[in-house]
Amino acid sequence: MKKVIAIVAGGDSSEHDVSLRSAAGINSWIDKEKYDVYIVEVSHEGWFAHLADGCKSPVYRHNFSFKDGWGRDIKPDYAYITIHGTPGEDGILQGYFDLLSIPYSTSSVLVESMTYNKFALNQFLRAFGVKVAEDVLVRQGQTVDAAQLVDKVGLPCFVKPNGGGSSFGVTHCKTLEALLPAIEKAMEECSEVLVESEMKGVEISNGAYRTKEGGMHVLPITEVVPKTDFFDYDAKYNGLVEEITPARLSKDTTKRVQSLTAAIYDILGASGIIRIDYIISKNAAGDDVINMLEINTTPGMTPTSFIPQQVHAEGNDMKDVLNEIIADKLCN
């Protein structure tokens, strides 16, 4: 009997549809000769397994099972979580699968919840010497003094939901007057908002994963050149960006970035594929400075996403990478 893989997608954030696109990519790469694969769509409206005939089968949450098209009970052996946002990127689903003893593709509850909280992540990594932006956390209902925020982080600055991704609710603020409306906009996505200083430089992204058999594997680096004001939703998903893999960095900077990616992965105790975004700025002497921007523990997995680009750039195949990731936790 083949093991059953559930690709868990959807979620309750604005990234629901983006997540389903990632699920389609993952589904195309998983080895169907080794595994039976179902996409399980999760949202506040219900949990449903997508069947081969186009129908949807309700998922019984007490044991994460469902009926297939012939009425047989299907209970997945492994969950490949590709939800971008809650509840798949903030630790909630990880806790659920831990209770059911179902192995999954991502990091643990603690790592997921901390990396999803951008402010908490910054404070944690700053203690290890990782360079991050100056930032202030604003909570819903809190009195906000825009002038005090600007004194702390300066202008221009970025206002973004403290949890979330795909640049939903993000504003690049260039004036004091734009700050409060930007905070209100971000509050529509999350009850906590991060206001952080702008880091000027070259934006890059670097994926990595570790398995028991293969050890640490850091992928080539992608350089991000948006045609918009910053790397927003249009740049990410509507083609308004140039993505260059491998990035146009010096050998020394490339090595330093990849070493830092591996170090952060191990500091966190991460698992599965993660992607770390950085800004490469210059110091007074003109040397490259590596600034951590954010960490994505369920990175996009469409054919044009960063991770597949980086895997292809090193001459590897996504099918082989996913087989390695799944086999790392799936008991045979």
Image (spheres, rainbow, N blue to C red):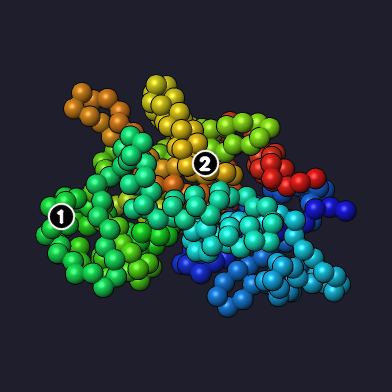
| Residue under the point 29% across and 70% down | 140
Tell me: 134 left or right of 265.
left
Looking at the image, do the residues carrying marks 2 and 1 touch, with CB atoms under 8 Å apart? Answer: no
Res 224 visible: no
Residue placed furthest toward the front: 99
| Residue under the point 64% across and 72% down | 47
Tell me: 29 left or right of 300.
right
The type of residue carrying mark 1 is Val
- Total labels: the figure holds 2
Residue 65, placed above or below residue 25: below
Locate residue 238, reporting x and y percent: 45, 57
Q: Quadrant of the C terminus?
A: top right
| Residue under the point 16% across and 51% down | 152
Task: Determine which of the numbered discs, if any, sits on residue 269 in the image.
Answer: 2
Locate residue 282, reporting x and y percent: 25, 31
Task: Report the front residue among 247 and 106.
Answer: 106
The type of residue carrying mark 2 is Gly
Q: Quadrant of residue 83?
A: bottom right
Q: Secondary structure at mark 2?
A: loop
Q: Quadrant of residue 182?
A: bottom left
Q: Quadrant of residue 161?
A: bottom left
| Residue under the point 57% across and 32% down | 217
Locate residue 97, reporting x and y percent: 64, 59
Density class for disc 2 (Cα within 10 Å; few <14, some 14-19, many ≥20) is few
- Residue under numbered circle 1: 150
Query: Nearer the viewer's eye, disc 2 or disc 1?
Result: 2
Task: Report the front residue among 49 and 171.
Answer: 49
Is tag 2's residue or tag 1's residue first in the polypeptide sequence? 1
Locate residue 296, reporting x and y percent: 47, 49
- The CA distance from mark 2 to mark 1 is 35 Å
